Amino acid sequence: MRAGDLDKFITIKRATTTTNAFNEKVQTWSDLVTRRHAMAQPVSDAERFRAGETLATRKYRFTIRYSANVADVDPRDRIEFEGRIYDINGVKEVGRREGIEFTATARAEAP
C-alpha cells in the first residue's frame, strides 16, 4: 500500500449508549478515529449487479493502514466520508497487519 494512494480522509464512528434527561438509554455515535487517511474506491456497477443490489445506494471500498485502535472495527460501526454516513458491510485484513479494507454502503439520497 503506497502512501500516495491514501489521499482521502474518513472518520470511523462507534455506537455508544448514554442516558438522556429522562434517564432513558439512547444510542449515540462517537468518533473512534477522526481524519484517518484512506483510499476510497467506488464499487463498480457490474459488481453491484452481480451482488443482486437494486436500491439506489453508494457503495465504496475503503482501505486504511492497520493499527491497534481500528483492529476491532466491525459492521456495527460506521464510516463518515465526504459528509455521508456509510454502513459497514464487510471488513477484511489486507496483508499481515498491513491494512484493513472496509466495504460500506450509503443511501444515494442521503445528504
Image (cartoon, rainbow, N blue to C red):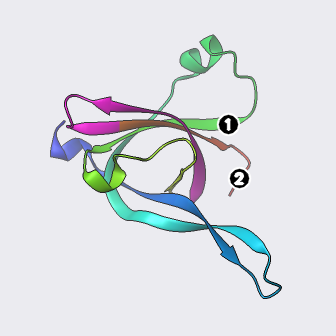
Q: Is residue 55 above or below residue 19?
A: above
Q: Any magenta on residue 89?
A: yes
Residue at the image point whose x is 60% and y is 20% from the top: 48
Q: Is residue 80 above or below residue 109?
A: below
Q: Any magenta on residue 29?
A: no
Residue range (magenta) = 83-100
User: Which residue reaches farthest left?
Assistant: 2
Q: Secondary structure at mark 1?
A: strand
Which label is found at residue 42? none
Residue 37 x/y as whole percent: 30, 54
Which secondary structure dominates the residues rendered in magenta? Answer: strand
Which label is found at residue 110? 2
Residue at the image point whose x is 20% and y is 37% from the top: 98
Circle 2 packing at 10 Å, graded few (<14), some (14-19), many (20+), is: few
Image quadrant occupied by the C terminus = bottom right
User: Which residue reaches farthest top?
Assistant: 50
- Whole-angstrom CA distance, mark 1 to mark 2, is 9 Å
The three-letter amino acid code for the residue at tag 2 is: Ala
Determine the image quadrant of residue 51: top right
Residue at the image point whose x is 67% and y is 36% from the top: 57
The three-letter amino acid code for the residue at tag 1 is: Thr
Circle 1 packing at 10 Å, graded few (<14), some (14-19), many (20+), is: some
Q: Is residue 24 above or below residue 40?
A: below
Residue at the image point whose x is 40% and y is 47% from the top: 72
User: Which residue reaches farthest right?
Assistant: 22
Q: Nearer the viewer, residue 80 or 95?
A: 95
Q: Is residue 24 left or right of residue 64?
A: right
Q: Is residue 6 left or right of residue 86?
A: left
Residue hosting label 1: 57
